[in-house]
Image: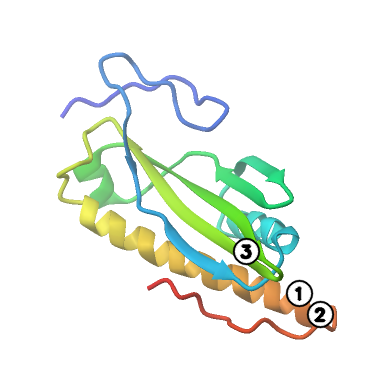
Amino acid sequence: MALAKDGPPGPDGLPVAAAKHPWHFFRSEPHVDTLFFELREVAPAAHRQFEADEWIIFQEELTDNAGAVVVTRWKQIHHPLIWLFMGKTMARCIVELRAVGPGRTLASFRAELGSHHKLEGNPMLPAAKKAYAKAARNWYRDVNLDLNARQRAHGRPGARRLEPAVR
């Protein structure tokens, strides 16, 4: 297996690839759930949770009063089996938020992987999908816990649900 020599990282954290070793990307299916909080509360909580999980925010945009998007920088996955089967692999997370009613925000969480090796059919891809699904569940759980704790600290009644419907 030839190792790709990457250039310096771009502004989004993804290293510039040599022409002989381009990046191949895999985009996960979105995990979607409703958070029982206003969009103006959920967007900062999404940002806080990514930072708590040691992601760096690359782009954060409030599209209007009804939507927002949070995108992390690419970062390398450091795992020996990933390295063995997929080579250098980068990951990033994208959350799209949309207000769907008073006190309700729809959150769509997805991940993207980048590798110099083709990812479709890779024996590690099912394990990567499973790890991503768990990360999505944990992200929803932790955002809900953060929002509920802040709501209690401000003397407001708690949300109706702590655990996301995503399984």
Q: Inspect this view and state whether residue 16 appears.
A: yes
Task: Say what amino acid the circle numbered 3 marks.
Answer: Thr
Q: Residue at x 55, y 44 (%)?
A: 72
For marks 2 and 3 on the same chain, the one whose residue lies earlier in the sequence: 3
Q: Secondary structure at mark 3?
A: strand
Locate the N terminus by quadrant: top left
* Closer to the camera in the image, 100 or 26: 100
Q: Gap in Å between the C-alphas at discs 2 and 3? A: 21 Å
Q: Which residue is mark 3?
A: 105
Q: Gap in Å between the C-alphas at discs 2 and 1? A: 5 Å
Q: Inspect this view and state whether residue 89 appears.
A: no
When asked about the image quadrant of residue 21, the answer is top left
Dots 3, 1 in contact, CB < 8 A: no
The nearer-to-camera label among 2 and 3 is 3
Q: Position of residue 74 (x, y in %)?
A: 48, 39
Q: Which residue is mark 1?
A: 150
**Residue 29 versus residue 56 in the image, above or below:** below
Dots 2, 1 in contact, CB < 8 A: yes
Q: Secondary structure at mark 1?
A: helix
Task: Say what amino acid the circle numbered 1 marks.
Answer: Arg
* Closer to the camera in the image, 105 or 94: 105
- Around disc 3, counting alpha carbons within 10 Å, would you say few (fewer than 14), some (14 to 19), or many (20 or more)? many
- Around disc 1, counting alpha carbons within 10 Å, would you say few (fewer than 14), some (14 to 19), or many (20 or more)? some
Q: Gap in Å between the C-alphas at discs 3 and 1? A: 17 Å
When asked about the image quadrant of residue 17, the answer is top left
- Judged left or right of residue 37, residue 73 is left
Q: Which residue is mark 2?
A: 153
Q: Residue at x 67, y 42 (%)?
A: 61
Q: Position of residue 66 (x, y in %)?
A: 68, 52
Q: Residue at x 77, y 82 (%)?
A: 152
Q: Secondary structure at mark 2?
A: helix
Task: Say what amino acid the circle numbered 2 marks.
Answer: Ala
